[in-house]
Amino acid sequence: MNLKQTIFSFLLTAIAFGIFGFLIGRSNETKTTTKWLKGEIIHDTIPIKKLVTKYIIVPKLLSYAEKQKDSTTITSKPINKDSAIVETIKDWNLERIYKDYLFKSDTLGTLEYNISVQYNRIKSFSYNYTPIYKEVTIERKRTFIPYVSTSYSTFNIVGIGLGTYYHNLGIGAEYQYNYDLQKKGLNMHFSIKF
């Protein structure tokens, strides 16, 4: 086999390995990680001017607050009209604060409200919203990694080769030529990445 045939066969092998390595090198392993992260708290108080009454419904019967030992009952039949009116006025003057969570969700976050009611009107309305954001991380790792190599030895040997890594294991071939002995050879090698 003369030098032209050797170079041609080496180039043909290199092109075939290159195409093979390119196609295999494009294959990937993917790892998807999903995290739920708390966002910054959004706090707002709605001004009283914006809290406008939309409807007023007048009941057919008047209701009175009737005070008992442990509780206050609302009734439409006053037993003692004067004491019921006094209790109703006391109840009307009370300030009631409603504070709770509208929702607590692992994917939406939390919405907490705080409402103050006095004199049959909302005095204040505020809320705290803590959103939760979904963060998806996709990590792609190449399964096959092709490579090309060249070498020179102090024994006057020159080589050119190619190979591929599968995860951390590598296999390759190298065409070598010794200038002193005028001989050609093939070097096969296996390698491990650390």
Image (tube, grey):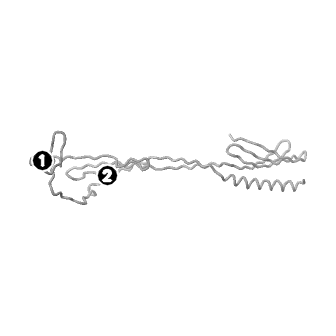
Q: Position of residue 190 (x, y in %)?
A: 75, 42
Residue wearing tag 1: 84
Q: Residue at x 77, y 43 (%)?
A: 189
- Where disc 2 sits, the SS reads strand
Amino acid beneath label 1:
Ala
> Residue 17: x percent and y percent?
76, 53
Q: Are marks 2 and 1 in contact (CB under 8 Å)?
A: no
Question: Looking at the rendering, in which quadrant would you find the C terminus?
Answer: top right
Q: Which mark is residue 45?
A: 2
Across and down, in percent, residue 16 comes to 77, 55
Question: Is residue 69 shown left or right of residue 170?
Answer: left
Front-most of 193 and 66?
A: 66
Q: Nearer the viewer, mark 2 or mark 1?
A: 1
Give me the C-alpha separation between circle 2 and circle 1.
35 Å
SS at circle 1: helix
Position of residue 186 measured from the top left corner of the image (x, y, whole percent): 83, 46
Query: What is the crowding at mark 2: few (fewer than 14 residues within 10 Å), some, or many (at least 20)?
Result: few
| Amino acid carrying mark 2 in the image | Thr
Neighbours of disc 1 within 10 Å: few (<14), some (14-19), many (20+): many
> First in sequence: mark 2 or mark 1?
2
Mark drawn on residue 27? none
